[in-house]
Image (tube, helix red, strand yellow):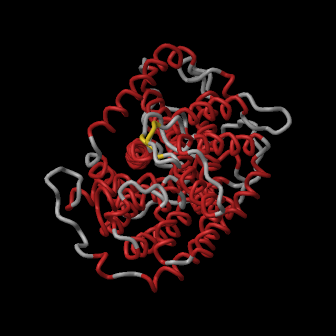
Amino acid sequence: MTNPLWRTKPVSSAASDNTGLKRVLGPWHLIALGVGVTIGAGLFSLTGVAAGQNAGPAVTLSYLIAALACGFAGLCYGELAGMIPSGGSAYSYAYASMGELIAWIIGWDLVLEYTVGAAAVASSWSGYVASLLSGWGITIDPRLLATPMTPVTLSDGSVVSAWFNFPAVLAIWVVTALLMRGVSQSAAVNNAIVMIKLTVIALVLVFCIPHIKLANYHPYIPPNDGTFGHFGFSGVMRAAGMAFFAYLGFDIVSTTAQDSKNPARDIPVGIIGSLLICGVVYAVFSAVLTGVVNYKGMANDPSPVATAIDAAGAPWLASLVKLGITVGYVSVLFGLLLGQARVFLAMSHDGLLPKVFAKLNTRTHTPWTSHLCFAALTSVLTAVLPIGELGNMTSIGTLLAFIIVCVGVPLLRMREPQAPRLFRVPGGPVIPVLGVLSCGAVMVSLDLLTWVRLVVWLAIGLAIYFCYGVRHSLLSRSKI
């Protein structure tokens, strides 16, 4: 008899899960969702951190390396999403290709990816809000803008320890309240916000390009300072690892299968379309940003775009751009918090988590329990952890998910060769293998502490699985 840990979920069953969610999203909604999530803190905040601490002006090269690896993974996502249009994203794909244990591991990893990602975005949003309000003459107490024990300077010049990041926590709960009202209304708001965000990016590029100083590009790849990941080529690769945080958007798209009108057709379109758009935006934007502001001044700057606008000397545009970015971050949080709840919903539907996480509100048809639980967890993380650490934790979770998806494509081709595929990755096994190798290369470039956090998180997840999931799984009880 097959060990229940390695049983795979039939493709037909994985593709036909009915969770009771309303199917209201079309292909343009999905592209907007992908762009909305992808263009956020990775562009408006981590660009500066990655340039200042790791890659210098070559952060543009880091984004291109990350985009290439993401492209391989994105194609694999497209094939599996068209074949298995289930709301669990990589979790559902692993369940159909590699078995329940691997599915649990990747599902738990996705929870880390989305939760920590939302915390990082909220942290960055807080920096832009403070900068925006400061321009309007409104000052927030510095102790409410940083993580606990961080030294901050008060208006009287005294240096004290911060309390916690209050605006970041507030943002999490506001977006959670929006999601709990229903996906249809939330998607309409998201579409409008994405248009505002793209307009802001266009304004920044048009205004900042004339203020580029070529001297800021020299040296393009600063020499390594003797520590792996601090400039040099290792710094470019370390920054590429951080950049994976920026490419969460198309992964989020794959979690919305049960919210989509025609998931088998629309999700591959949303994944590949959003990835192409965002790859170009990241490369161009990072090149302009590091040309206007010297990378050395961005190492600990949570709002480098605001700094660039200020350096270019346009206070009227600064307020407009900061307002647009602040509003634009809502679409990023929307996608991340939506993805969290959808993965937990799929895992609960399969019996691996308590049924309470699969229960929908009778009026809005949204998983209120999951939304509230994740809002609480994400609030704690964004209140107490700095954005650099949050970004690395998100990136390693994203990379692991990408590798699992790339491995799943050839496995399912062998196991289910006759299953219908609306989109097929070209080149046989070449692209999936390149996806595994490129994502793996970036993954090993991340620091040891990030790896330790991942191992600890997965250990906690395995404890939950063996205490609860393995005994309540519908597959183990042969009910599906």
Q: Residue at x 55, y 77 (%)?
A: 314
Examine the image and state in which quarter residue 237 appears: bottom left
Instruction: Identify whether 333 is placed above or below 194.
Output: above
Q: Residue at point 45% right, 24% down? A: 461
Is 250 in front, or is 477? 250
Q: Residue furthest right?
A: 363
Q: Is residue 168 above or below residue 218?
A: above
Q: Position of residue 376 (x, y in %)?
A: 61, 31
Q: Residue furthest left?
A: 226
Asked whether 86 or 151 is in front, the reply is 151
Res. 412 in view: no
Q: State the residue in front, 83 or 370.
A: 370
> Percent from the top left, x then y, of residue 247?
47, 56
Q: Is residue 397 left or right of residue 469?
A: left
Q: What percent of the width, then of the height, locates residue 275?
A: 50, 63
Quadrant location of the N terminus in the rendered image:
top left
Q: Along the line of sight, which residue is nearer the eye, 129 or 443?
A: 129
Looking at the image, the residue that sits furthest to the bottom is 210
- Of the 4 image quadrants, the one containing the C terminus is top right
- Locate residue 244, reporting x and y percent: 41, 54
Count of marks overlaid on the render: 0
| 235 with respect to 123 (left or right) | left
Q: Can I make out residue 391 in this image?
A: yes
Q: Say whether residue 232 is left or right of residue 437.
A: left
Q: Residue at x 28, y 43 (%)?
A: 447
Task: Identify the image quadrant of residue 136.
Answer: bottom right
